[in-house]
Amino acid sequence: MPKVRAEKKSRVHNEVAKQGIVFNKDFGQHILKNPLVITSMLDKAALRPTDVVLEIGPGTGNMTVKILEKVKKVVACEIDPRLVAELQKRVQGTHLQPKLQILIGDVLKTDLPFFDICVANMPYQISSPFVFKLLLHRPFFRCAVLMFQREFAQRLVAKPGDKLYCRLSINTQLLARVDMLMKVGKNNFKPPPKVESSVVRIEPRNPPPPINYTEWDGLTRIAFLRKNKTLAAAFKQTTVLAALEDNYKLHCSLKNLDVPADLNVKEMVDRILEKLDAGSKRARSMDIDDFMAVLQAFNAEGFHFS
């Protein structure tokens, strides 16, 4: 009989099996195992002994333990009760135990506590909503050092004219300074993800720019729906004009102003864009100042985007 080859199993999966943990792909669980990457991330965070650190997705605690040794307190948010048990077991009976607080649940549905620094090797599928939850959090934190899928990280730091420049880029950069720190290969995780990763540093702008963020988000949503189209084309869409008309009438009602009998929203929009010489501009090449000018011009005429 021919010899049947035994199926190969990687050392990593044997170790995981011994722990009794099968990582949950639905939660995006990829544990960062390289201590050099962890050390580098914490160095970039510039931790202080008085800091309270928020860690998202602590996993089995490889990074958590190193943070606990450097700071006053760590608040770790973990959705998987199995990993919570592993983390508790890791610090149980040590001098680090009193410094660790664990929040069990979905971080997007959790009220974040006060913290100075946020450090995370987080599930990539919640990257975008988490970034904005973080940036709208008050009181302000000092900075966040976060691991993301590489393309997402590139979008965060992209500049006007870049191929990956998008609504995410400008909305993030409005509220924070974002810097690319380092690339991290997939073999630094167990199990390895299908994509490469990068680490970014996000530092909130304090004070934030003096604009209504909901209005800003509404404007950029219209402009970036088709980022290669001109603003004039973006504002010609029937749904956009209808929403602007509704908001204009609401504005007039709140200000006790009469709505013109011959109201023509399309002509008013064209006039605003022509006055700014912005009708031929395209979202892909507009910077924060360009969008601020457009937002202020529309608001001055009674048009709102929220």
Image: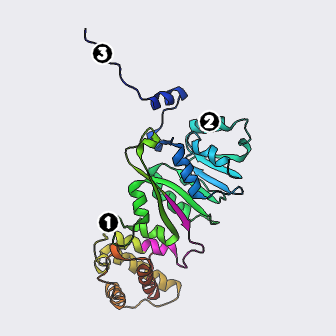
Q: Position of residue 296 (x, y in %)?
A: 46, 84
Q: Which residue is mark 1?
A: 163
Q: CA distance from mark 2 to mark 1?
A: 44 Å
Q: Secondary structure at mark 3?
A: loop
- Mark in front: 2 vs 1: 1
Which residue is rendered at x = 40% and y = 26% of the image?
A: 9
Q: Which residues are magenta?
A: 200-218
Disc 1 packing (10 Å; few <14; some 14–19; many ≥20):
few
Label tally: 3
Q: Nearer the viewer, residue 210 or 73?
A: 73
Q: Residue at x 62, y 48 (%)?
A: 76
Q: How packed is label 2: few (under 14 Cα within 10 Å), some, or many (20 or more)?
A: few
The structure residue drawn at horizontal position 59% and vertical position 56%, both measured from the top left corner, is 118
Report the quarter where the N terminus lies. Answer: top left
Between 50 and 82, the one nearer to me in the picture: 50
Q: Position of residue 43 (x, y in %)?
A: 58, 55
Q: Nearer the viewer, residue 212 or 82?
A: 82
Q: Does the image show residue 306?
A: no
Q: Amino acid at mark 2?
A: Ala
Q: Secondary structure at mark 1?
A: loop
Residue topped by disc 3: 4
